[in-house]
């Protein structure tokens, strides 16, 4: 994943898939899967960043939860992911 600051104050996301992944049908499937996995994470990304996710071959067969956890970990490493608020314990 690649990140860069932007001046627009919003999150811009791109998905890159190499021809090494396969033909156009497979590349588009990989992009659709990445987009579907990223959508729920979007609300927790700090505004003002451009993000680029680069797909690997595993994106075609990996379970959605695995892809989503990998994306969340990459966002945390980049410092652009806000943790969801934890509910305070009831006494």
Image (cartoon, rainbow, N blue to C red):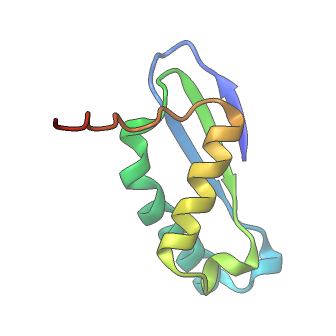
Asked whether 45 or 50 is in front, the reply is: 45
- The image quadrant of residue 24 is bottom right
**What is the residue that sits farthest to the front in this orientation?**
91
Q: Residue at 57% of width from left, 72% of height from top? A: 66
On screen, 20 above or below 71?
Answer: below
- The image quadrant of residue 85 is top left
Q: Residue at 52% of width from left, 62% of height from top? A: 68
Residue 14 lies left or right of residue 18; in this view the side is left
On screen, 71 above or below 5?
Answer: below
Quick one: quadrant of the C terminus?
top left
Asked whether 7 or 3 is in front, the reply is: 3
Could you say where residue 87 lies in the image, as x and y percent from the top left? 26, 38
Could you say where residue 15 lies in the image, as x and y percent from the top left? 61, 55
**What is the residue that sits farthest to the left in this orientation?**
91
Residue 63 lies left or right of residue 17; in this view the side is left
Residue 5 lies left or right of residue 89; in this view the side is right
Q: Residue at 83% of width from left, 78% of height from top? A: 20
Q: Residue at 49% of width from left, 26% of height from top? A: 46
Could you say where residue 52 lies in the image, as x and y percent from the top left? 66, 45
Asked whether 43 or 54 is in front, the reply is: 43
Could you say where residue 53 lies in the image, as x and y percent from the top left? 66, 53
How many marks can you see?
Answer: 0
**What is the residue that sits farthest to the right in this orientation?**
20
């Amino acid at each position: 994943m690649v990140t860069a600051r932007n001046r627009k104050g919003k999150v811009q996301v791109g998905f890159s898939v190499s021809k090494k992944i396969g033909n156009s049908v497979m590349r588009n499937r990989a992009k659709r899967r990445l987009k579907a996995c990223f959508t729920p994470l979007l609300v927790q990304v700090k505004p003002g960043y451009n993000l680029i996710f680069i797909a690997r071959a595993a994106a075609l067969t990996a379970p959605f939860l695995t892809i989503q956890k990998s994306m969340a970990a990459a966002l945390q490493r980049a410092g652009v992911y806000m943790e969801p608020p934890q509910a305070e314990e009831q006494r």
